[in-house]
Structure formats: C-alpha cells, structure tokens
Image (cartoon, helix red, strand yellow):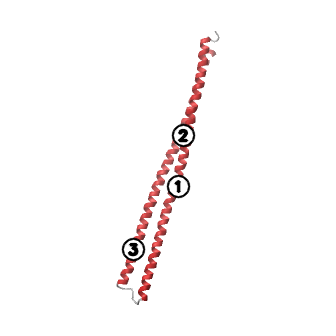
C-alpha cells in the first residue's frame, strides 16, 4: 500500500478521472449550442438593425413623396386657374361674379387636395417611424440575448473544465497523501 491507497483506491481514482473527463466532454455540446445561439441572435440583431434603418429611410421618402404630390397639385391648380382666367379674358369677361366663384372654387379644391396629401404623407411617415423604433428595440433585445448566450457558453465550458479538474484532483488526492 503506497501513500495510504490500495487496489480498490486505484480503481476509484481511475473512475474519478474518467468521470472528470466525461463531465468535460458533456459540457462541450452545451457550450457549442450556446455559441450557435449567440451567433443566431447576433445575425437577428443585424437584420433588425437593417430593417430599422430602412424604415427610417422610408419615412423620409414618404414625406418627400407627399411634398412632390403637393407641388404637382399646386402646379395643376395654377394651370387650371390660369386657363380659366385666359378663357374669361378671351370671352371678354372680367374677373367678377361667376368667374371669381370658379377661380375661388379651384383654389379651394387645390388647397384641400394639398392638405389631404400632406396629412397622408405624415401618417405614412409616422407609421415608418414606429416601425423603425420597434425594429431598433428588437435589435437591442437580440443583441442582449446574444451576449447572454455567449456568457452561458463561457460558463458551460468553464464548468466542464473546473469539474474535470476537481474530479481528477479528488481521484489523485489519496495517492498524494
């Protein structure tokens, strides 16, 4: 008997070492799975961030499109009023009575159309802004999940290593005393 250990102790030591190595091997799939999850979450965070940027861009495009449509309406109103004035003058009538009524009506219709276009453009832009904000939040959430998964992978790997060291040390301790 060397160092206070017999043949049964040697078998126990070998079993302890095998157990430690087994624990280390078993911890690796968990760590690998956590790393794969972290990678997936990182990809999702990137996709959400891209979507958020695109939605913010779409918001600005919606406002610009509404402005262009308003300018088109204003141009059409100016053409219509100019045409009406030319027809009245060509017929020898002045700007009075029915002529003024028609001009005012054309201007009111144009103002109404520009207002509706502006409101719809603002609604569209706000919708895109809400989408952008939502996607930015999703991106932050996915980034946090990726960080947590990376920490879990480190923990699983460390747990396996320290567990193996503990099992091996525990198995060898009787031979060292």
Query: Based on the displayed image, in which of its 4 quarters is residue 161 positioned?
Result: top right
The extreme right residue here reads 2
Label 1: few (<14), some (14–19) or many (≥20) C-alpha neighbours in 10 Å: some
- Identify the residue at image location x=36%, y=81%: 101
The C terminus - image quarter = top right
Residue beneath label 3, please?
109
Query: Based on the displayed image, in which of its 4 quarters is residue 163 positioned?
Result: top right
- The answer to whether residue 11 is above or below residue 152 is above
Q: Disc 3 versus disc 2: distance between alpha carbons?
A: 58 Å
The extreme bottom residue here reads 92
Element on which disc 3 rests = helix
The extreme left residue here reads 97
Instruction: Mark yes or no: residue 4 visible.
Output: no
Residue beneath label 2, please?
37
Residue 5 vs residue 86: left or right? Answer: right
Label 3: few (<14), some (14–19) or many (≥20) C-alpha neighbours in 10 Å: few
- The reply to whether dot 1 and dot 2 touch (C-beta < 8 Å) is no
The extreme top residue here reads 1
Residue beneath label 1, please?
53
Counting from the top left corner in percent of width and height, residue 28 is at 58, 32
Q: Disc 1 versus disc 2: distance between alpha carbons?
A: 24 Å
Counting from the top left corner in percent of width and height, residue 45 is at 53, 47
- Identify the residue at image location x=40%, y=76%: 107
The N terminus - image quarter = top right
Q: Give the foreground label among 1 and 3.
A: 3
């Amino acid at each position: 008997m060397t160092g206070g250990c017999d043949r049964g102790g040697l078998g126990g030591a070998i079993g302890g070492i095998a157990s430690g190595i087994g624990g280390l091997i078993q911890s690796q799939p968990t760590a690998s799975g956590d790393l794969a999850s972290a990678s997936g979450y990182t990809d999702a965070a990137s996709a959400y961030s891209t979507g958020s940027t695109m939605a913010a861009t779409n918001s600005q495009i919606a406002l610009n499109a509404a402005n262009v449509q308003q300018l088109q309406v204003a141009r059409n109103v100016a053409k219509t009023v100019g045409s009406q004035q030319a027809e009245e003058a060509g017929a020898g009538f002045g700007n009075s009575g029915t002529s003024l009524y028609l001009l005012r009506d054309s201007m009111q219709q144009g103002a109404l159309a520009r207002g509706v276009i502006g409101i719809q453009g603002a609604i569209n832009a706000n919708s895109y802004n809400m989408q952008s904000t939502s996607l930015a939040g999703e991106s932050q959430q996915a980034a946090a999940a990726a960080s947590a998964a990376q920490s879990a992978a480190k923990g699983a790997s460390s747990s396996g290593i320290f567990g193996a060291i503990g099992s091996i040390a525990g198995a060898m301790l009787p031979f060292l005393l």
